[in-house]
Image: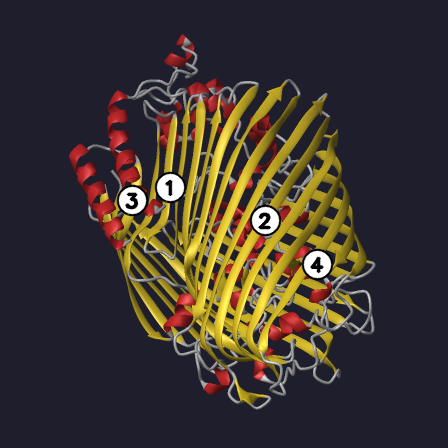
Amino acid sequence: MKRTVIITLALLLLTMAAHAQPAPFELEAGYRWLDLKGNNDMYRSQINERNGFLIRSFTMSTQTSQFDRLRVDISDLGVGPAGSLRVAADHGNLWKLRLGYRTTDAFSALPNFANPLIGQGIIPGQHTFNRTRRMLDIDVDFFTDHWISPFVGYSYNNNHGPGTTTYHFGQDEFKLAQNLTERDHEFRAGAGFHYGAISGQLLQGWRNFHSTESLSLFTGANNGNNPGTVIGQPVSATDITRVDRNHVDTPFTNFYVTGDVRNRVRLVANYVHLAASGDGTELESANGSFASFAISRFFTGFNENARSAARNDTWRGGGRAEVALAPNVDFVAGFQREHRDLNGTALVDSVFLNSVLFSGADKKDLETALNATSSVERNTDMFNATLSARALGPFSLRGEVRESKMDVDVAPDLSEIVVPGAQGGAFNRRIRTIDTDANYAKAGLLVGVAWRRDRANEPIFRTDYTDRDRYRLRAAWKSPKDFFRAGATAERTSQNNDRPDIGYDAHVRQISGDVVITPIAGLSFRASLSQFRSDSDVIIRHPENFTLDHSINLENGKAQEGGFTFFRERFSLDGSMSRFTNRGTLPFVVMRQRARVTYDLKTKAGVAFEWDRDKYDELNPAFGYYDASRFGVYLRWRP
Amino acid sequence: MRLETLAGPFLVLCVSVFPMAAQEQTPPATTTAPPAATEEAALPSCTDCHDVMKPFATNPHAFGKVKKDAPIPNSLCETCHGDGKEHILNGGDKTKIFKPVGLEGSNKTCMTCHDTATDRITRHGGMHSNSVAVNCLTCHSIHNGDAHSQHLLAKNELALCSNCHSTQVASFRYQPYAHRLGRGGMECDSCHEPHGRPGRESLRLTRAGEAPCLNCHADKRGPYVFQHGALAIGECTTCHEPHGSANPKRLKRATVLAVCIECHSPTGTGTLGSQPPSFHDITSPRYRNCTTCHVAIHGSNRDPQLLK
């Protein structure tokens, strides 16, 4: 990666030097150093900015003889953790190209999340990954001014990399090394059309997803997570291997059409359908000393062969009418119906080698077969009607009513049911919503209030609300000449389900405000304060003794930030610092400092220095502490 | 395919092409030639006074309408500002020229060309419905757009959305587990349609009509033989915070146990969420970390209990 960026930069410099004439682009590229103290895994799980070369930004927008428009944008391409390249090019009305590329490094190795061994001081947890996702999108439209405009497109999404995971097997949990490769290709073609008052688009796509996951027993994990014996017998593994392969084909269709009626009424109809069909295979083998309560036996080896097929058939269709009742006064009403049908079958053939009953008798290879089918069918109808007055003097008003009605049928396979109940059946949930907002905007002042009320008849999940209310108040004022700007937002969402056996009650309160003062041209100060408080409470049942209890989650965060920007002729300086404190269920403190200095050595060239410091500290226990500073030195070129 | 490898040569190509193009530039075939009225030729050019117009040649609104090394034709400015003759003849009298501002400015200029409706855009009833509070010119600056933002945005996207959605932006900016916005290609509009898609939160669906999360997290699409109900019937946000979260994995609760047990406690009837067997002693660390065993939490093709 580093080599690629070095070569890129070198070629860029050579090319520009060779031409030595104005070119309308801005390039900022250089090197970033990392100085890290504390937990590297936690730092990488949250931020993951590493040492290396980086094209910090590149923007070019121009006309050429080949392109009526050519625009290239790059952001953070290089050492990551996320970078992108975008290209937009047009050649008259003959063709239009859009290309987007993104790469993202995803790293996770959290010390005290989902880690049953944290009490023994073993960090990080056993679920880790270090993966890279690369995504490419290309779309080309042809004859963009014709009544019919064909287009083709392609998307590619690749996610791959190593990781570790766990496997509950033989009455113990074993850590496994994992290698994952996922590739998704999407081809699409279609045409947009515009004929008189009618316009629309028809798109047909074909998606092909393939994944391979290879797993093997992690070095040194032979004894599993749990010491001791199972019915007097130790459980251990000498090897475990598994290879999972999945393949999903998904053709899909997306169509919409709009029509204008005398410039007063606009009708829009849409339809989208996807039919995903997946096939999977699994091969697994294990050797060691294991136990199974499901077959009431000890065994020394295991072979499994599984084949599966799953389908997702989903369509959605509907329409809406937009009616201009008067200038800036509109009525919009629409209806959507969505149908989703999921079903699957699996044939799993398992052989337990050298199995014996817990009593020690009946030694044999035991074969079990699972032939499972499952299905979920979901139908959702959504209706909405909106009346909006977009300008009544300085006021704008909007009111909307919505109804969403969901019917769900779940048919689990018997093999899914360990404790009967709450795993299948028919569910109906209807939500009625009133959503309103009003705004006042005049002379730099903006005041807005919004209220939304949702009422549902029944929950499907226990954390579904039956009553929800959301309030929002917003105000901002900007003085003439932008000398002063202040804004504040307050939001409160309350949701609950008063059913006595659920007792769900949750609130989110957020307040934020910011001020920007620009006393002289080129100098501005800013400060912001935000507070986030979230609490939820729901009745739960302890599985081990069936007693009822409360699951309570609290987040109480407060953020303060201050900063300034100064620029004068060749020099600019931007600095800020912030502190975020959470005193909730997972208390922590995040402190951030940022500084960026640019200096133009010449009209066309300059340098930029960046300093970013992030300090994270979990208060109790402090497994995740880190203090990371990144220093970047970048060359700026603007021919 | 490692596209970083291609990025370098591509950049070089772009840089190489431009200077040549700057020399060879000719009006595109589709150029609409500005009116060659002698009256206009006799008038001063708008760019004589308005420096902001000088770089307008690279503005999308000027494509095909500006000749190489020629001044920006006044007719181009007049597309939005109306006839400028009186303004010029009166020494730049600001009252003699139309300056598009606010909703009226949007309606009289932008919407004369951009008032389109598609499945995902409405400018008449959605969240951003071209009102006095939010209109085209609230977010777009035709002359002074942010150089690094596409679509002539007045500022970079995060700063722009922050003007009204400061609480949402705060969760990206301050929470330790957050999608990385503003750098590296992900922006607010990666998931939200800013032009007012009718429906919930103006979400920008995939081309196949799925939730925007699946644009990147393609592996979570399934389908699985054994679907986790939270995904099959609910949605990603049943368990995850889409913006930023204080909790690892952007979960809605601080611990795995809390995420799972709140649904998997069937204390009554009529809800979905199975009862864990009684050997799940949640006072023991082994059973407080559900995903240690139930690793295939989004769905599985082989194991009904999502163990693999």
Dot 1: element: strand
Dot 2 and dot 4 residues touching (CB under 8 Å): no
Looking at the image, is mark 2 or mark 1 earlier in the sequence?
Answer: 1
Dot 4: element: strand
Looking at the image, is mark 3 or mark 1 earlier in the sequence?
Answer: 3
Looking at the image, is mark 4 or mark 3 earlier in the sequence?
Answer: 3
Give coordinates of residue A543: x percent, y percent: 71, 80
Mark 1 surroundings within 10 Å by alpha-carbon count, few (fewer than 14), some (14 through 19), many (20 or more): many
Way the structure is coloured:
secondary structure
**In the rendering, which numbered label is found on residue A471?**
4
Q: CA distance from mark 4 to mark 3?
A: 44 Å
Dot 2: element: strand
**In the rendering, which numbered label is found on residue A27?**
3
Q: CA distance from mark 3 to mark 1?
A: 10 Å
> From the viewer's perspective, is A150 left or right of A545?
left
What residue would you read off at disc 1?
Answer: A73
Amino acid at the residue labelled 2: Gly
Question: Do pointers 1 and 4 mark residues of a single chain?
Answer: yes
Dot 2 and dot 3 residues touching (CB under 8 Å): no
| Disc number lying in front (3 or 1) | 1
In the image, B45 versus A169, the foreground residue is A169
Residue A108 visible at all:
no
Question: Do pointers 2 and 4 mark residues of a single chain?
Answer: yes
In the image, A10 versus A207, the foreground residue is A207
In the image, A285 versus A167, the foreground residue is A285
**In the rendering, which numbered label is found on residue A278?**
2
